Image (cartoon, helix red, strand yellow):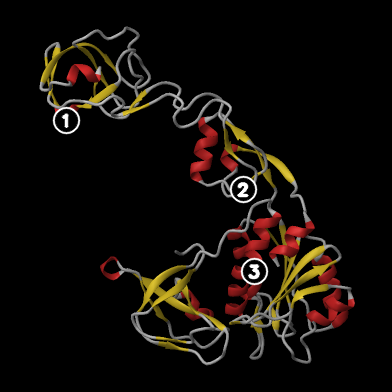
Amino acid sequence: MIEAIAAAKLAPRCAYVELGQALGCVLAEEVHADRDYPPFDRSTRDGFAVRAADTARAPVTLDVVAEVKAGGMYTGALRAGQCVQIMTGAGMPASADAVVMIEHTKPATGSVLIERAAEAGQNVVPRGSEAKAEQLLLKPGARMGYPELALLGQVGHVRVKIAKPPRVAILSTGDEVVEVWQQPNGLQIRNSNTISLAAQVELAGGEPVPLPNAPDHIHELRKRVERGLQEDILVLSGGVSMGKYDLVEVVLREMGATFAFDAVAIRPGKPAVFGTCNGRFFFGLPGNPVSTMVTFELFVVPAIDMLSGAQPRPLPSFKAKLAAAVKQKAALTHFLPAMMEWPGGEPVVKELPWQGSGDIVALTRANCFLIVPESKLELAAGDWVDVLPRRGVL
């Protein structure tokens, strides 16, 4: 899948936004330092700026010739036996090469007792040690989080060129599906998949484009698929299994689609499909809600990253200790709703009771998925296992 998207070499559409609107966006330009950072030798502690050599025989008393706070600097040169009281963030005086923390001194009127010897460079950040003027700080493809925004602000980069979020058409299918505001009859279900998929698209950095549900009718389904393929990505839910009325693959093949895969060795989510049609990427996800959510996280999120001009983010799995034994039968990789906790500071995960891939209620109680690999379907209590956090929860 990743190879197919990379081979297409699709350049994202770009736009300029104000700095305050760039959170979560993908950078589409280089950002360089406008000057040295820090732009002067900077004290990192409240204390006294000294010549380190003057403190070699500490304890020693030095004359205090000035006081400097952040935003100021003593312009004179220190002579032997002199120092300057200095605050965190202030510029270092000429000839001073160290700062003695105030905790290691005993100030008096006009002087200070230095109780510990200082080494050159102690508690000082040299000019340009963080970045040099014109140095490349951020490359295209960087996602804008709060450190990146702070860096842009620091260098005065107030208008930011970003990749516009890819537009993701969301199309649910099935005669049994009604809108969330409708009253279903005893055999109908409300369209929760469009709601969850739109939320997942936003969390992944895309722009959701929800479409009306498509009935199990080839002509109507084709019209909605054609509309969805006008966007950067089309995500369908339902209609991808082997049933008589699972028509998504039928319609896509009639439209000349190329399939990169039409099943994956996971549960929930085995019937998921991916391919291209009319120059657009599509994903067909199973209709059961938990299957839809899992397969979106595994397959659609990397596609959104790549169509945003970024590298696909690695799957954010991590290790935790299993609280109770788990056993699965099907030779697939399983993603089970689970709860992660940290009793005593150690991560512990436990599978939650659930009724299969249609059980949204169980998933609302989970903060992660416990991953049971195909290679080891029986896990014992105390085993270290892989866990996939629910995006936006952990």
Residue 108 spot, x, y in % from top left = 10, 16
Asked whether the residues under the numbered discs 1 and 2 touch, taking CB atoms below 8 Å apart as contact, a structural biologist would say no
Give the amino acid at mark 1.
Answer: Glu
Q: Quadrant of the C terminus?
A: bottom left
Give the amino acid at mark 3.
Answer: Phe
Of the pair 8 and 278, the residue shown nearer to us:
8
Question: Residue drawn at (49%, 67%), measured in percent from left and top?
Answer: 317
First in sequence, mark 1 or 2: give its number.
Answer: 2
Disc 3 crowd, CA 10 A, few/some/many (<14, 14-19, 20+):
some
Q: Nearer the viewer, mark 3 or mark 2?
A: 3
Q: Is residue 113 above or below residue 361?
A: above
Distance of mark 1 from mark 2, alpha carbons? Answer: 44 Å
Distance of mark 3 from mark 2, alpha carbons? Answer: 20 Å
Q: Could you say which disc has been placed on residue 271 in the image?
A: none
SS for tag 3?
helix
Residue 327: image quadrant is: bottom left
Q: Quadrant of the N terminus?
A: bottom right
Give the amino acid at mark 2.
Answer: Cys
Of the pair 203 and 385, the residue shown nearer to us:
385
Question: Residue drawn at (80%, 80%), measured in percent from left and top?
Answer: 249
Residue identifier under label 2: 25
Left or right of 40 in this view: 343:
left
Question: Residue drawn at (55%, 35%), measured in percent from left and top?
Answer: 152
Q: Is residue 158 visible?
A: no
Of the pair 149 and 217, the residue shown nearer to us:
149
Distance of mark 1 from mark 3, alpha carbons? Answer: 55 Å
Residue identifier under label 1: 103
Residue identifier under label 3: 299
Residue 61 spot, x, y in % from top left = 12, 16
First in sequence, mark 3 or 2: give its number.
Answer: 2
Left or right of 138 in this view: 207:
right
Disc 2 crowd, CA 10 A, few/some/many (<14, 14-19, 20+):
many
